[in-house]
Amino acid sequence: MAAYVARRVLAGVPVLFLVVTAVFFAFQLIPGDPARAFLGPEATPDVVERVRRELGLDRPIVVQYASYLRRLVRGDLGRSIMTRRDVSLELAAPFLSTVKLSLASIVLATVVGVLLGTIAAVRQGSTWDHLASIVALLGISIPVFWLGLLMMYLFSVNLRILPSAGDDTWQHYVMPTISLATFSLAFIARMTRSSLLEVIRQDYVRTARAKGAPEWRVVGYHALRNALLPVVIVVGLRFGYMLGGAVVTEQVFAWPGLGRLLVAAVGQRDIPLIQGILLLFATSFVLVNLTVDLLYGFLDPQIRYR
Amino acid sequence: MAFFRLHRLAAVGGAIVVLFVAGGLLAPWLAPYDPNTINVQATLQPPSRANLLGTDNQGRDLLSRVVYGARMSLFISMTSVGFGAVAGVALGILAGYYRRLDAPIMRLNDVLLAFPGIIVALTIVSILGKGLENVIVAIAIVQVPQYVRLAHGLALSVKDRVFVEAAVAVGAPDRTIIFRHILPNTMGPIIVQTSLLIPGAIMTAATLSFLGLGVQPPTPEWGAMLQNSLQWARLAPHVMVIPGLALMLVVFGFNVFGDGLRDAMDPRLRRMSGTPGGMA
């Protein structure tokens, strides 16, 4: 197990390094002068020149890349053009906000998705199965922002029972959580259904039935335990995507998270801030994937020896 | 029963896809009005005989705008997925066929896969700027890693088949092996993959426009129409309901059609192809 853990952890390092490199060089393609962008249009040419030298923009690109890496190692992500504050300070609170929303959504998606998928599989071919399948199909087809808008129109504007913006109370969580969870919920339900249908035909499930175990125990213990292995992977992947996919939901519900910050930063072309957000996304994504890999190795011993 | 139901759903999906493509291609003949003609006498009208889907805040005919929006969606999704498929399949086959290229291409691919599609698209738009052409480039790049991963796996498995070994043995050049033997044997799964990626591309394009970073108003585009509807939904809910419904219907159609296509072509693909389309 230790060797497996070490191998998985080491596999994430080159990906992160490549992400850092790609994020640095991609933004070199932008036309225009970052020093000018930082200072605004009123600055005089000699001030721009001085800042260019201070920021090291007059040096060769490879030297800039090396110093970018050095600063990154110290946790220095540069300063935001919009607010002039350190990017790392700008990211802390929104990141926490996004993580909270994503956690709430993944819990909702997993619980309801597994339940829906199980009902559909156990009652295969019944009305329940059809209903669950249709809900799942609609769930992966509905535009997240449209679902958000419809809920907002119904519950905030018409019925006035839920707040439409912010993250202060639990009521603020209801609509953004549902909106962010829907796609993953449908996805998890489909996955659970097909995985469970495969397992239910296995010999050990028949054995459990034959020895007279009650049906809830056959499904809930013998079948579901094995059927959920692939679902674990999907849940993990979806959680990683949620951290980034929250962009749209956060925009609709004015949720003060990373996604909303990214849209604002892109609108303002605040490059240090965009780079910081991208690195944070990629790091969390790699970490989530690593956790899933480890969890999977822990749950299914066969994986460790491949 | 379940088998029958699946095929019936796939047929419904196919019908929606055909309607969408036909509507997009024939928009100038199908739309009852010019989608950009403003009529201050008839703003925010509910559906009526003159305007079957009503009008928006500037009195523009919503049915005409929805039909032209389909044309825009069709154009963006076909071009971006097309470019993405060509680039991704080429890179994937190269990585699978030439051992030297495997690591560099696949590691770069991992970088793109480390971000949700919408984040990659946002980043590219932030580098290139807003607008139609840049949205197409951005969405094309989002598709590339999906094709690279699939084509790489397929090329690796086809490379070991006997007919490729035979071609190598008789001294066929790499070019012949790739174009005559490997590429044709990857086409089936790649076509299925394409039908499953198109709804995601449609959704991403609409999302970018909704965020104000894609196709700009007054061009009729579903995401941009939804953005515009925010201010008016209270007075006239139909301006918010209609473009979203169109978007959902088309994505739904492609999803069930793609599912059916996948099952029909090769049931084993269930495990191989990517996620169904939709929001990342």
Image (cartoon, coloured by chain):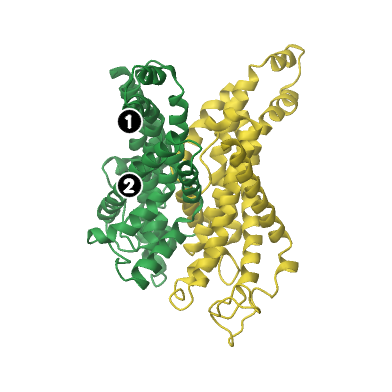
In this figure, which residue is indicated by the disc labeled 2? A108
Is A163 on the left or on the right of A130, as rendered? Answer: left
Question: How far from the left and from the top, in percent, is residue A198?
Answer: 47, 27
Q: Residue at x 34, y 63 (%)?
A: A254
- Near-viewer residue (A203 or B168): A203
Residue B90 seen: no
- Camera-side mark, 2 or 1: 1
Residue B138 seen: yes
- Quarter of the figure with the N terminus of chain A: top left
| Quarter where residue B61 is shown | bottom right
Output the letter for the chain in green.
Answer: A
Q: Residue at x 31, y 71 (%)?
A: A160
In this figure, which residue is indicated by the disc labeled 1? A216
In the rendered image, the vertical position of residue A95 relative to residue A158, given as above or below = above
- Near-viewer residue (A116 or A229): A116
Amino acid type at circle 2 is: Leu
- Near-viewer residue (B124 or B209): B209
Dot 1 alpha-carbon crowd within 10 angstroms: few under 14, some 14 to 19, many 20 or more: few
Q: Chain of mark 1?
A: A
Q: Secondary structure at mark 2?
A: helix
